[in-house]
Image (cartoon, rainbow, N blue to C red):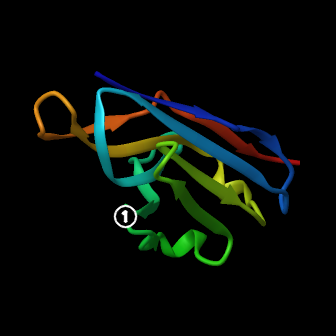
Amino acid sequence: QVQLVESGGGLVQPGGSLRLSCAASGSIFSINAMGWYRQAPGKQRELVADITRGGTTNYADSVKGRFTISRDNAKNTVTLQMNSLKPDDTAVYYCNAWVQSVVTGRRYNYWGQGTQVTVSS
């Protein structure tokens, strides 16, 4: 089994910054893509950013130039640096990872429990 544990959410004023972190642990052989998704009340979950094991990144248009995703393959962690936050960024943010199992060798998709980000004055 694999666990993804997020941290770093909270309340911030518009224009402020937050840093989200996610650590993966468990029966991990390797982690392929890792990413962050978000879900605002009444809306569908959407991709915010993802990153391949090799470091290739992909961002939603709404966050380009404001958010930066990075990862540490040795520590099985992924981080989302969020700057110039807007009220529209308010949502529950979820970590996601494609993990190759050390037991079966197969890839499985995992989600974290979510962390609330609220941008409000």
Side of 7 where 27 appears, left or right: left
User: Which image quarter is the N terminus in?
Assistant: top left
Side of 78 where 83 appears, left or right: right
Residue at the outermost front position: 74
Residue at image coords 40%, 52%? 34
Residue at image coords 39%, 44%? 96
Where is residue 103 drawn, in percent x and y? 16, 27
Please tell me in which quadrant of the rendered image residue 58 appears: bottom left
Counting every numbered tag in the picture gives 1
Packing grade of label 1 (10 A; few <14, some 14-19, many >=20) is some
Where is residue 37 drawn, in percent x and y? 45, 50
Residue at image coords 73%, 60%? 86
Please tell me in which quadrant of the rendered image residue 16 appears: bottom right
Relative vertical location of residue 76 with respect to residue 2 in this rendering, above or below: below
Q: Secondary structure at mark 1?
A: loop
Residue at image coords 68%, 58%? 81
Depth check: give the residue in front, 29 or 109.
29
Where is residue 92 drawn, in percent x and y? 56, 39
Depth check: give the residue in front, 104 or 113.
104
What amino acid is found at the position of numbered circle 1 in the picture?
Thr
Relative vertical location of residue 15 with respect to residue 46 in this rendering, above or below: below
Side of 84 where 116 appears, left or right: left
Determine which residue is flagged by label 1: 52
Side of 55 where 92 appears, left or right: right
Residue at the outermost top position: 1
Relative vertical location of residue 43 with respect to residue 92 in this rendering, above or below: below
Where is residue 110 drawn, in percent x and y? 31, 36
